[in-house]
Image (cartoon, rainbow, N blue to C red):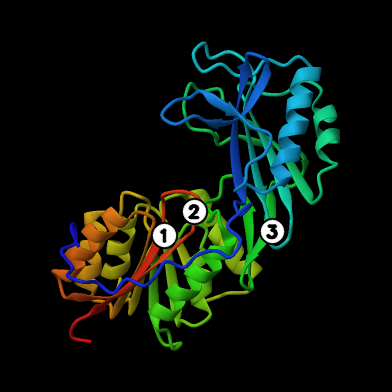
């Protein structure tokens, strides 16, 4: 109402989670030298001081065992954890991916070097974890806050897990963008599908498509789906996931959204429905302008930031679209963040 200027918008009650604990399928734990040993946990608010933990109520409990094993390994082998100030030390982070449906697990150790000592010992320790499918080493020698580099080596197994959202199968690598709460994501994407109102005859444009999660959901009820994403690795994953599910009417293109959708439109692709699921900063203004020019019947906006959502909906509202229902989804339980899905329809439709 304040930013978008909408009077009494139809906002449904937030869709909550029955059991809002242990839901996250991805964890990133910084590793540092502590006053009494090795600190592994999370950063304290507005700092890079680590709050040492043994377990977390919103992370999968398998991570408790991973932390314990890596802490023991570092201590036993007298390995120096990474120091942000000096840039010295070896082990920087532990990153995990865990399949909610399949229970598959990959563990990635991020290091300030090219290898780790006695890697076979670490591998042997981690192999006792139920569902383990891969043990990885990510080489990150840069003085940066970015956790993962582009260089990942497989120490054991494979570099991805398999998991499902609904009946769609996904191959998820350590770098893949994938919603962290698969239970709520299933509801979120189902609502996006309902709001899209597909009958099997529509062309759909999925902007900021990631590894194709929404695209593949919609492809089953659409004539054709084109997914656009700037991260090339994500597009590779999307194409692989389409093949994995025998979906042949979804095309994925890598590049800046504002550039690609303009080219797609210029080449004659007319979208009946547009789906946008942008990062927290919202849609690029050129993306919104192309959507307005394309004049799809419906725009389904999935947002992780209500402020930029309101800003972008106002632009659409000023250019021929009316706001329908909006539904918040408690995607990030026990945090202040919320995911929201909104339908915008052309007024002349």
Residue 332 - label: 2
Observer-nearest of 197 and 259: 197
- Residue at image x 58%, y 74%? 247
Residue 339 - label: 1
Residue 162 - label: 3
Q: Is residue 283 visible from the viewing direction of this image?
A: no
- The answer to the question of whether label 2 and label 1 lie on touching residues, with beta carbons closer than 8 A, is yes
- Residue at image x 60%, y 47%? 26
Residue 143 - label: none
Q: Is residue 237 above or below residue 200?
A: above
Q: Going from the N terminus, do you reach mark 2 or mark 1 first?
A: 2
| Front label number (3 vs 1) | 1
Name the element at disc 2. loop
Name the element at disc 3. strand
- Residue at image x 34%, y 54%? 305
Number of numbered labels in the structure image: 3
Mark 2 nearby-residue class (10 Å; few <14, some 14–19, many ≥20): many
- Residue at image x 57%, y 28%? 51
Q: Is residue 70 above or below residue 33?
A: below
Instruction: Quadrant for residue 313, please give it.
Output: bottom left
Q: Is residue 46 above or below residue 99?
A: above
Q: Going from the N terminus, do you reach mark 3 or mark 1 first?
A: 3
């Amino acid at each position: 109402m304040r930013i978008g200027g909408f009077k009494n918008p139809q906002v449904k009650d937030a869709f909550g989670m029955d059991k809002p604990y242990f839901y996250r399928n991805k964890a990133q734990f910084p590793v540092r030298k502590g006053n009494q040993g090795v600190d592994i946990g999370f950063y304290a608010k507005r700092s890079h001081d680590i709050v040492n933990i043994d377990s977390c109520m919103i992370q999968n409990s398998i991570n408790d065992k991973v932390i314990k094993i890596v802490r023991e390994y570092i201590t036993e082998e007298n390995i120096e954890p990474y120091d942000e100030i000096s840039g010295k030390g070896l082990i920087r982070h532990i990153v995990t991916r865990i399949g909610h449906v399949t229970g598959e697990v990959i563990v990635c150790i991020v290091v300030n070097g090219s290898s780790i000592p006695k890697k076979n010992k670490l591998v042997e320790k981690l192999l006792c974890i139920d569902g383990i499918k891969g043990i990885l080493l990510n080489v990150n020698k840069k003085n940066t806050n970015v956790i993962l580099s582009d260089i990942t080596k497989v120490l054991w197994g494979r570099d991805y897990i398999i998991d499902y959202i609904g009946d769609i199968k996904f191959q998820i690598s350590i770098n893949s963008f994938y919603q962290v709460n698969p239970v709520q994501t299933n509801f979120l994407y189902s609502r996006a599908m309902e709001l899209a109102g597909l009958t099997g005859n529509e062309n759909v444009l999925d902007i900021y498509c990631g590894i194709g999660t929404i695209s593949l959901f919609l492809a089953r009820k659409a004539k054709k789906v084109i997914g656009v994403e700037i991260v090339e690795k994500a597009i590779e994953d999307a194409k692989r996931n389409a093949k994995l599910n025998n979906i042949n009417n979804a095309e994925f293109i890598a590049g800046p959204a504002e550039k690609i959708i303009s080219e797609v439109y210029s080449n004659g692709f007319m979208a009946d429905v547009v789906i946008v699921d942008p990062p927290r900063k919202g849609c690029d203004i050129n993306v919104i302008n192309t959507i307005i020019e394309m004049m799809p019947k419906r725009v389904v906006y999935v947002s992780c930031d209500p402020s930029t959502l309101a800003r972008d909906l106002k632009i659409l509202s000023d250019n021929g679209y009316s706001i329908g229902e909006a539904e918040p989804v408690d995607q990030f339980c026990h945090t202040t963040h919320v995911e929201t899905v909104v339908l915008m329809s052309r007024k002349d439709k």
